[in-house]
Image (spheres, coloured by chain):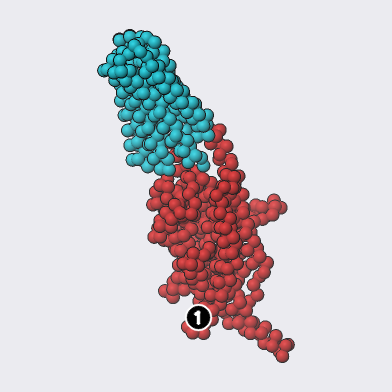
């Protein structure tokens, strides 16, 4: 029971991810009535869980390298700090991403525990935030021109194009949901991986590891978020920010799915390394920013009319502000949890190490 | 299953456009047979255009019902609906004009007959280009422009011919005012068919921009 209480912050993060980010995949499809909400919700839920359980390990491993939260109470607070940051910044209408918030919160834990943050891992993560929208823009730019040529060449009847687009939105949406689950489960459950006391389960000859159970739980939280709250967000996204035709929505979802997949696929990383090619880091990226990148790509392919460049500035500011705010909240709340609620948030050995370092420094300087 | 329904709808839409195109030909031949005082042929064309108008109506209703009950092309169905209804007005106008000719039997003096025939021919050209533009809208929106300017051309040409005809009629010293007004009425009605085709073209110009991905 206590475990569930500690996991609740991660589950809440999962819920908010489902509520918000599913709209990046199915928003336009649902708001333009190309796909029914329940079809979208069922497809998204199944594939998000599959993505999380089957391919979620890669990005989680990268977050683990950034900071290995080693007590469940600490993990709870790190996830909660990220959730609060996301909630608060959303409320203030500031651009925010769960991926950036969790990274900040982990760095906050590192600071609190006195552990050095792996700068190389942090740089790798931060560079993907910049890379992912650019890559998405490049993909959608190319896809847009390609689809345009195909439509010009094949002269598909409007009714048939409608049928193809519907099928495409569901199939590519499924791929998008899989990629979202694979890429973003690390944000939701990553900090709990080394501390959640789940044992391997044998189910009809099938062994389910503790990590898979954790990811399944996180995936289910995302699915609950999709079913309970995403419809509202989908309708807002579809009709508000940018009006996309169903065909451009298809291109946006395809580009976004590929980018999320590239940053989550261990199989692809292994293949690239095996062929002596530069590998793509497995890092949780912001699906909302990737979507904005994709939409911009279409804008550029259309001659760059109507692009609001201020959006880019807002995204870039989020890369800096979100992790800083999350780190500060994480640090302060870890302090409170440890000293006011008397919960161990850092393994004593870490603290001893930390204090030893400090006392050595004091002795040296003293 | 989904493609079978789609195929059926595509065929219905093609059939609807065929009816409009065919009614243009029938209208032109009907006017010609009236001008030649060929009663039998005129009655046959009048009946033909009535049947075509009815069939086009039925097809339009079937397509509209299918689009709305099966939530097809949700982004563009309002546009398609408006297009079909406006283009249906074109057949209605052609049928009504031919039907009124049959009822009112205007006496058209020999010297104006060529003018009326030229006017009918020009309005039907506008109608035919309109149908081509609609077909292009369904399959290749980028080529719609190729037909729209022709619709506008024939509409202007019809206006010019109608005006010329009316001027000649009213300048005539051999006709009573009542007959002049009667003749003007038919010139106006034939010209209106081209105006309706222009309405469809105006809509197509906007909807094509909306359809580009």
Report the residue marked by disc 1: A337
Q: Which residue is at a point 54% across and 81% down the rendered structure image?
A: A335
Q: In terms of depth relative to the viewer, which is nearer, B164 or B61?
A: B164
The answer to which image quadrant residue B76 occupies is top left
User: Depth check: B213 or A333 in front?
Assistant: B213
User: Where is residue B182 shown, x and y percent of the image?
Assistant: 31, 19
Give the answer, above or below, for where A92 lies relative to B209: below
Mark 1 belongs to chain: A
The answer to whether A134 is drawn above or below residue B77 in the figure is below
Q: Where's residue A162, x and y in %?
A: 45, 39
Whether residue B169 is visible, yes or no, is yes
* Residue at (48% x, 69% y) in the render: A88
Give the farthest residue toward the left: B103
List x then y, in percent, for residue B212: 51, 40
Give the color of chain B as drawn.
cyan
Q: Is A326 in front, or is A3? A: A326
| The furthest residue to the front | B173
**Element under disc 1:** helix
- Is residue A44 among the parts visible in the rendering? no
Q: Which color is chain A depicted in?
A: red
């Amino acid at each position: 029971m206590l475990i569930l209480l500690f996991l609740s912050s991660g589950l809440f993060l999962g819920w908010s991810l489902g509520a918000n980010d599913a709209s990046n995949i199915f928003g336009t499809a649902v708001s333009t009535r190309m796909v029914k909400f329940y079809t979208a919700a069922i497809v998204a839920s199944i594939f998000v869980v599959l993505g999380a359980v089957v391919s979620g390990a890669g990005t989680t491993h990268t977050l683990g390298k950034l900071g290995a939260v080693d007590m469940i109470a600490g993990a709870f607070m790190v996830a909660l700090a990220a959730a609060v940051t996301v909630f608060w910044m959303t409320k203030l209408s500031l651009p925010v991403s769960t991926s950036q918030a969790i990274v900040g919160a982990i760095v906050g834990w590192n600071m609190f525990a006195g552990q050095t943050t792996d700068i190389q891992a942090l740089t790798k993560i931060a560079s993907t935030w910049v890379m992912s929208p650019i890559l998405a823009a490049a993909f959608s730019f190319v896809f847009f021109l390609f689809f345009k040529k195909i439509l010009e060449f094949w002269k598909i009847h409007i009714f048939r194009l409608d049928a193809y687009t519907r099928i495409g939105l569901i199939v590519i949406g499924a791929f998008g949901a899989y990629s979202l689950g694979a890429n973003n489960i690390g944000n939701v459950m990553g900090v709990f991986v080394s501390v959640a006391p789940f044992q391997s389960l044998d189910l009809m000859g099938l062994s389910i590891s503790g990590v898979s159970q954790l990811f399944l739980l996180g995936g289910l939280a995302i699915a609950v978020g999709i079913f309970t709250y995403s419809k509202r967000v989908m309708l807002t996204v579809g009709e508000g920010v940018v009006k996309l035709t169903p065909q451009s929505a298809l291109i946006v979802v395809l580009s976004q799915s590929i980018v999320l997949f590239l940053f989550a696929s261990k199989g692809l990383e292994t293949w690239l390394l095996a062929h002596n090619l530069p590998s793509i880091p497995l890092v949780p990226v912001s699906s909302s920013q990737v979507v904005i990148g994709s939409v911009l790509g279409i804008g550029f392919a259309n001659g760059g009319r109507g692009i609001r460049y201020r959006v880019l500035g807002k995204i870039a500011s989020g890369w800096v502000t979100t992790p800083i705010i999350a780190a500060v909240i994480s640090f302060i709340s870890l302090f409170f949890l440890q000293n006011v609620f008397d919960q161990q948030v850092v393994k004593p050995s870490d603290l001893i190490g930390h204090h030893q370092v400090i006392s050595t420094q004091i002795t040296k300087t003293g | 299953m989904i493609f079978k329904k789609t195929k059926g709808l595509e065929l219905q839409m093609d059939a609807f456009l065929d009816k409009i195109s065919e009614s243009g030909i029938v209208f032109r031949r009907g006017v010609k047979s009236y001008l030649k005082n060929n009663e039998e042929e005129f009655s046959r064309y009048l009946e033909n255009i009535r049947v075509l108008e009815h069939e086009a109506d039925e097809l339009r209703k079937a397509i509209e019902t299918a689009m709305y009950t099966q939530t097809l092309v949700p982004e563009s169905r309002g546009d398609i609906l408006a297009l079909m209804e406006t283009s249906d007005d074109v057949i209605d106008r052609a049928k009504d004009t031919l039907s009124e000719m049959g009822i009112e039997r205007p006496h058209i003096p020999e010297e104006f007959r060529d003018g009326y025939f030229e006017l009918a021919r020009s309005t039907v050209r506008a109608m035919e280009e309109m149908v081509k533009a609609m077909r292009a809208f369904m399959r290749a929106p980028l080529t719609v422009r190729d037909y729209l300017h022709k619709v506008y051309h024939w509409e202007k040409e019809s206006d010019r011919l109608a005006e010329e005809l009316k001027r000649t009629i009213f300048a005539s010293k051999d006709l009573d005012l009542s007959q002049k007004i009667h003749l003007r009425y038919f010139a106006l009605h034939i010209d209106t068919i081209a105006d309706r085709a222009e309405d469809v073209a105006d809509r197509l110009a906007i909807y094509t921009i909306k359809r580009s991905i």
